[in-house]
Image (cartoon, rainbow, N blue to C red):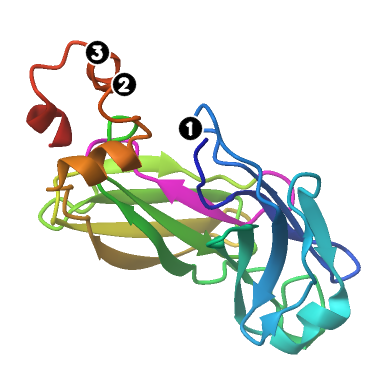
Amino acid sequence: MSRKPPTITVQYLKGDGSLHLEWDLDRFFPDPEDPDEVWIELPAGPVTGPMDGREVREIDLPASTVQPYAGTVLGGSVVFKWTGPPDDVQGSAFAIALPGGGSPAPPAQVPFVPQLQVLAREPKTLRNENRITIGWASYSYNKGNIFWGPADQPRLHTHNIDPHGAKYSGTFTTDRPLRPRTAYRFTVQVTNGFEHRTVEAEITATSAANHISVRQFLRESGVPTPTGLRGALRGARSLRASMG
C-alpha cells in the first residue's frame, strides 16, 4: 500500500463566501492507502479537527474562517495522517485568490494577476517521469494558458487552463519528461475577452535530481525489493537506465 499526499481535485468560493474543497487519494498509484485522519490547515494553523480520512473527501470552510484573508491569495493545506508508530503525516497545498471586502465576487471585472506556487518537484521513478507541479489562482478570466519550458525555451509547451464554471485556480503537473537539475520557467497567462485585457505571471523551478540510491528509487517506485524488480522493469535494458 502506498502513502502519498492527497490530490486536491476541486477548490472554489461559494456564493455565501465559504470555501469549498474536495480531495482524493493519489490514484496515480494502484494501491493508495486511506489515511486514518484528515484536516485542513490555513496560515494561522488547523481550522478543522481531525476527520475520518477513510470517509471524508470534501468540506466547506465557513465564510467566517475565510473572511480574515480577504484581499490576499489564501494558501493552505489538506493534511493526511496515518497513525503509527511512527505516525506518517503528509499534506498538499492549495492557493486561491480572495477578493477584497469579503465578497465572493471579484472587485473589478478584469483579470487578477495570477498568484503562483511551486507545489512539488519529483525525481523520476518507475511510475512517473521527473516532474514539477505548480499551483495558480486568479479571477475574472475566460481564457487561460500555461506556457512552460527550459530557461532557454520558456514557451516551448502550452497547457490550456480555460476556467470551468467558477473554478479560477488549480494545479498543473508537467506532462513531458524533465531533465534533472534543470531550471524550467512557467508563465500563467489569463485573458478577459470581454474587457480585452490579458495579464500574466511567471515562476521558475529547478527540477529535482534523480535518485542515486537504488534502494530509495525502488521504494519510491513502490517496488517490493528484490522480488518485484524483474516485473517492474518491463523489458528495460537496466535498472540504471530506468533511474534516468
User: In the rendered structure, does residue 98 fall within the stretch colored magenta?
Assistant: no
Q: Which residues are magenta?
A: 164-177
Within 10 Å of the Cα at label 2, are there few (<14), some (14-19), or many (20+) other Cα atoms?
Answer: few
Distance from the alpha carbon under mark 3 to that under mark 2? 11 Å
Report x, y in % for residue 70: 72, 84
Three-letter amino acid code at the position of disc 2: Gly
Quadrant assignment, res 49: bottom right
Does residue 202 appear left or right of residue 6 in this picture?
left
Q: Who comes first in sequence, dot 2 or dot 1?
A: 1
- Residue drawn at (81%, 80%) of the image: 65
Whether 236 is drawn above or below 18: the answer is: above
Three-letter amino acid code at the position of disc 1: Phe
Report x, y in % for residue 13: 77, 64
Quadrant assignment, res 91: bottom right
Three-letter amino acid code at the position of disc 3: Arg
Report x, y in % for residue 98: 68, 75
Whether 237 is drawn above or below 88: the answer is: above
Seen as rendered, the residue at the extreme front is 85
SS class, disc 1: loop
Q: Which mark is residue 29?
A: 1
Residue at numbered disc 3 = 234
Residue at numbered disc 2 = 228
Q: Is residue 124 visible?
A: no
SS class, disc 2: loop
* Magenta-colored segment: predominant secondary structure: loop
- Compare residues 190 and 197 and report the one nearer the observer: 190
SS class, disc 3: loop
Q: Which mark is residue 145?
A: none
Distance from the alpha carbon under mark 3 to that under mark 1? 17 Å
Q: Who comes first in sequence, dot 3 or dot 2?
A: 2
